[in-house]
Amino acid sequence: MTKEAYIKNILKKIQCGRDKKKDIQKQLETDIHMRLEEGEAFADIAREMGSVKEIADSFNEELSEKDRKQYRRGRTLKIILLVVLCLAVICAILYWVLPKAVPLEDSRYFNQAALEEAMTKTIDLFDKEDYDSLKNMSTPDMQPVLTKETMDSAKAQVAQNWGSRVSMGQIYGAELIQSGKHFGVGEVTVTYENASVTFHLTYNEDMQLAGLYIR
């Protein structure tokens, strides 16, 4: 162990404020320096002075109550600062991960007309059960889901027999930002002969279908 590491480890174990530690540091450095100047090896000096714990305990026994209070106050402040820092990091992560909605009129990536066109086309293909065409306009992650079996199962959870489409309601859209990625999301209620179905559709920046949810 070097002289610097020896003194640093001692100071870590002394329970006092910063100013007091600086005084102790100067005292230790002066004492060791004088003995080094006299030709003693540092290893011999450290062995004679004692272990890090022994020296720190000796200083701690001589500390005043004022010094101890300063140490406790400083330690509490460090803990508070650490907690605040951790909370700030957590908040930053949550802000990055959690989705944030932006009105389409404020979006740089999507607009209402393009979103309505894409949603209308998606629902038309869905009603025609043209899942191959839907796959061609979807992201790679969505394509395996767009099969007749999967879609029939999803439809059945809403109603067994929807019947023909009667009307389509107003389309509501927004931009969704999540983990630095931008998505156009839209929702519309479509009325069929035997069911009223709400479509929630998601598109990536290239207007590829990235999510399809019905209820």
Image (cartoon, rainbow, N blue to C red):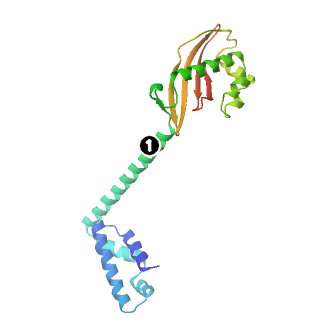
Which residue is under mark 1?
91
The residue lying at 24 percent from left, 65 percent from top is 66
- Closest to the observer: 106 or 196? 106
The residue lying at 44 percent from left, 28 percent from top is 106
Asked which secondary structure carries label 1, the reply is helix
* Figure quadrant of residue 147: top right
- Closest to the observer: 93 or 81? 93
Q: In the picture provided, is 27 more to the left or to the right than 215?
A: left
- Marks counted in the figure total 1
The residue lying at 71 percent from left, 16 percent from top is 128
Residue 215 in view in this figure: no
The residue lying at 68 percent from left, 22 percent from top is 154
Q: In the picture provided, is 63 more to the left or to the right than 190?
A: left
- Residue 110: x and y, percent? 52, 28
- Residue 115: x and y, percent? 55, 23
* Figure quadrant of residue 127: top right
Classed neighbour count for the residue bearing mark 1: other residues with Cα under 10 Å, few (<14), some (14–19), many (≥20): few
- Closest to the observer: 5 or 47? 5
Q: Amino acid at mark 1?
A: Cys
- Residue 10: x and y, percent? 39, 73
Q: In the picture provided, is 179 more to the left or to the right than 32?
A: right
Quarter of the image where the C terminus is located: top right
Residue 48 drawn above or below residue 182: below
- Residue 118: x and y, percent? 60, 22
Residue 31 in view in this figure: yes
Residue 101 drawn above or below residue 22: above
